Amino acid sequence: MKIKILYFAAIREKVGKGSEEIEAAEGETLHDTMEKLKSRYPIIADMNESLLVAVNREYCKRETVLKNGDEVALIPPVSGG
C-alpha cells in the first residue's frame, strides 16, 4: 500500500522535499513507518521526541495502524513569542 508523507519546516529543509509517497506493509503502524523514515533521514531521528505527527490531519499515537492512501504529516516544534 502507499502512504503519503508530508514534511514541514526544518524537516522539509533537511529532507529537501515537501512530500513523498512510500510503500508500507498491510497492518503497518505509524511507529513502523517512523522507524523507516528515521533510518532514511537522520534528521527525523534527531527530532523524533519533539515531533508532532498527524495522520489524515489528526494527531495520532504511534500505534495507529495505517491504511492505503493515508497522509502522514511530520511537524517539528515551532518557537516564537
Image: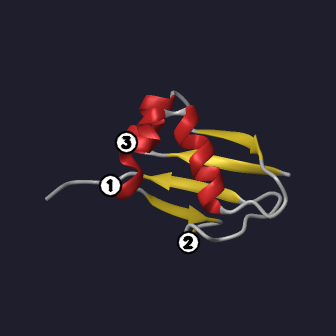
Q: Is residue 78 left or right of residue 1?
A: left
Q: Name the residue under label 2.
A: 60
Q: Mark 1 points at which residue?
A: 77
User: Disc 1 on helix, strand or loop?
Assistant: loop
Question: x%, y% of residue 17?
Answer: 56, 31
- Which of the two labelled residues, at mark 2 and mark 3, occupies the earlier sequence position? 3
Q: What residue type is labelled 1?
A: Pro
Total numbered labels? 3
* Number of residues whose C-alpha sits closer than 10 Å to that of mark 1, classed few (under 14), some (14–19) or many (20 or more): few
Q: What residue type is labelled 3?
A: Asp
Q: Which amino acid does label 2 sit on?
A: Cys
Toward the top, the furthest residue is 16
Toward the left, the furthest residue is 81
- Which of the two labelled residues, at mark 1 and mark 3, occupies the earlier sequence position? 3
Q: Mark 3 points at which residue?
A: 46
* Number of residues whose C-alpha sits closer than 10 Å to that of mark 3, classed few (under 14), some (14–19) or many (20 or more): few
The CA span between labels 2 and 3 is: 20 Å
Q: Against 62, is 75 above or below?
A: above
- The residue shown at (68%, 63%) is 29
Question: x%, y% of residue 50?
Answer: 34, 57
